[in-house]
Amino acid sequence: MPEGDSLHRAARRLQVLVGEQVEVETPHPRAAVKGLVERLDGRRLERVEAVGKNLLLHFDGGLVLRSHLRMTGRWRVEPRGTARRGSPWLVLRGAEHEAVLWNGAVLELLGARPAPRLGPDILGEPPDYGTMLARFRAEAQERAIGDALLDQRLVAGIGNLWKAEALWEARVSPWRRLGEVGDDDVRAVLEAAHTLMRTSVEGTRPPRRVYRRPGRCCPRCGGIVRSAPQGDHARTAYWCPDCQVGGAAPPS
């Protein structure tokens, strides 16, 4: 699933259209029924921003288009008139460039409303760690920190990749309950996520230490990396049990 850093990179690419009156097309039939052409074609794109895992496109007249990519969505920016195969969900065409959304998943007009029920963006500058921590403490404290990090109501933008890598950087097991993790350690995990994801946005993706590396040696301590499903949605957690210790025993 594209995570917050991917959305911030997409927002940067789309800046080439900001300030232009854009032509709007919805070639895919599932997007065509949303009436976006009728509402947006010919409007000026005033601003593009990433908020968590959402891309918000602000048009004149107070209209905001929210794009969430889910598992397979992708934004591409290409020269105007680029040939392509298939039916993208959305095309925004400017004088020299066009932004193309493939596998759109979620597209909705918000009017002037913000994206719903999101916590502070982990890639905010500066990140609002105080509010993030307060939201973690307002949660049920028996919840595992690895599961809580994926809750976009608590902190927006972190997905399974950066959850695993940030916990590894901070030496915190994904299975430790929130009540077992001190404020300093929670903040260390959030700071690690911000640093890793900001580095990725700037163009240098950090190496994976544990994510999708079960059965391999931990590059820090030489232990064997494990994986197991976690949370109600059974997202796979990756961790080194030798240097990320504590918490309830995960599934064997």
Image: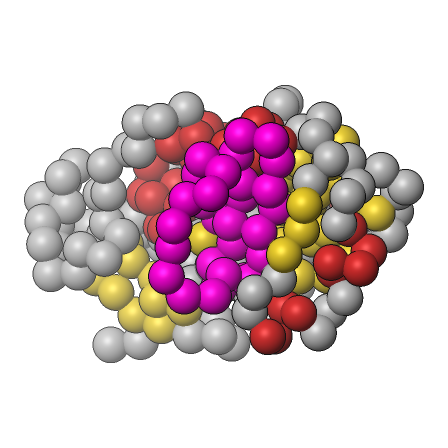
Quarter of the figure with residue 95: top right
Residue 115 visible within the image? no
Span shown in magenta: 75-104
Identify which residue is drawn at 61% across, 35% down: 94
84 relative to 104 in the view: left or right: left
Residue in front for this viewpoint, 187 or 242: 187
Identify which residue is drawn at 31% across, 76% down: 251
- Residue 6 coordinates in the image, percent (x, y): 45, 42
Identify which residue is drawn at 21% across, 62% down: 226
Reply yes or no: does residue 148 show up in magenta: no
Residue 66 visible within the image? yes
Q: Is residue 183 placed above or below 179 in the rendered structure?
A: above
Q: Is residue 27 placed above or below 193 in the rendered structure?
A: below
Residue in front for this viewpoint, 212 or 145: 212
- Residue 31 coordinates in the image, percent (x, y): 63, 68
Identify which residue is drawn at 44% across, 39% down: 78
Residue in front for this viewpoint, 165 or 248: 165
- Residue 241 coordinates in the image, percent (x, y): 24, 55
136 relative to 197 in the view: left or right: right
- Residue 235 coordinates in the image, percent (x, y): 41, 68
